[in-house]
Image (cartoon, rainbow, N blue to C red):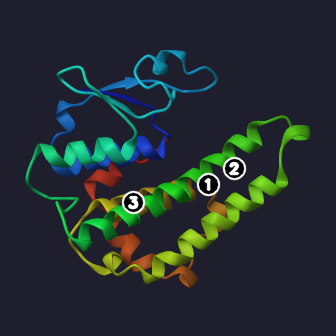
Amino acid sequence: MKLLYSPTSPYVRKVRAVAIEKGVSSQLELISATPWPDPTHIATLNPLGKIPVLVCDDGTELYDSPVICEYLDSLTPDPQLIPAAGMTRFRILRLQALADGIMDAGVSIILEKRRPPAEQSPAAQARALNAITRGVGALQGELSLSTHAIDLGQLAIAIAIGYLEFRFPELEVLAPRYGLQDWWQRISARPSLQTTIPN
């Protein structure tokens, strides 16, 4: 399998962490790719011009990260990161959606700040920042964060928090008011997260 990746993409990091948790990371050939400024080379595999893209051994291209993560989870039975059915499955997928939304908002701020100053939208940045703040605040109510069994939702949230720490340390998302410190200390020590820290 080939994975088009960038080492600083949180979505790629999520895929790589899942591959490590599933014990299939050695089957991934990492191919450096960046969608900026021109995604032409990526668009031949993903018409949206986004990473990650997974090219399976049979040539099938999979995108984006939720689909790739579900595929990787299907390759081996243990650990099962996404239950096959039931409300637990949808709670985990909801948690992944929350994490992806937090990351989406962070990426939108980064991209907005790359525009010429006269073209930047303070309103768009404020809207994205509010989404991040609400998203992180909502994590206190997620009971799955208190469990010790790893799942895709927890991995996705950990990567979202790691991305905010990497790109927006001034937000202090690990401050005591958010109540994530104990959980973060436990989950961030996992090899899947240590190995994939962005640089």
As measured in the structure, the alpha-carbon distance from the residue carrying label 2 to the one carrying label 1 is 6 Å
Query: Is label 2 in a helix, a strand or a loop?
Result: helix
As measured in the structure, the alpha-carbon distance from the residue carrying label 1 to the one carrying label 3 is 14 Å
Sequence order check: which comes first, mark 1 or mark 3? 3
Q: Is residue 122 left or right of residue 54?
A: right
Q: Position of residue 17 (x, y in %)?
A: 30, 48
- On residue 96, the disc is 3
Q: Nearer the viewer, mark 3 or mark 2?
A: 3
Identify the residue at image location x=87%, y=39%.
Answer: 119
- Which residue, given by chain and number where applicable, does mark 2 sit on? 109
Residue 196 visible in this rendered orientation of the protein: no
Q: Amino acid at mark 3?
A: Gln
Q: Is residue 119 left or right of residue 108?
A: right
Identify the residue at image location x=15%, y=59%.
Answer: 80
Quarter of the view holding residue 27? top left
Q: Position of residue 105 (x, y in %)?
A: 61, 54
As measured in the structure, the alpha-carbon distance from the residue carrying label 3 to the one carrying label 2 is 20 Å
- On residue 105, the disc is 1
Q: Position of residue 112 (x, y in %)?
A: 74, 43
Q: Amino acid at mark 2?
A: Ile
Of the pair 48 and 171, the residue shown nearer to us: 48
Q: Is residue 140 left or right of residue 155?
A: right
Residue 36 visible in this rendered orientation of the protein: yes
Q: Position of residue 132 (x, y in %)?
A: 61, 64
In this view, which residue lies farthest toward the left?
77
Query: Is label 1 in a helix, a strand or a loop?
Result: helix
In this view, which residue lies farthest toward the right?
118
Of the pair 83 and 156, the residue shown nearer to us: 83
Query: Is label 3 in a helix, a strand or a loop?
Result: helix
Bin the neighbour count of mark 3 within 10 Å (Cα to Cα): few under 14, some 14-19, many 20 and up: many
Q: Amino acid at mark 1?
A: Ala
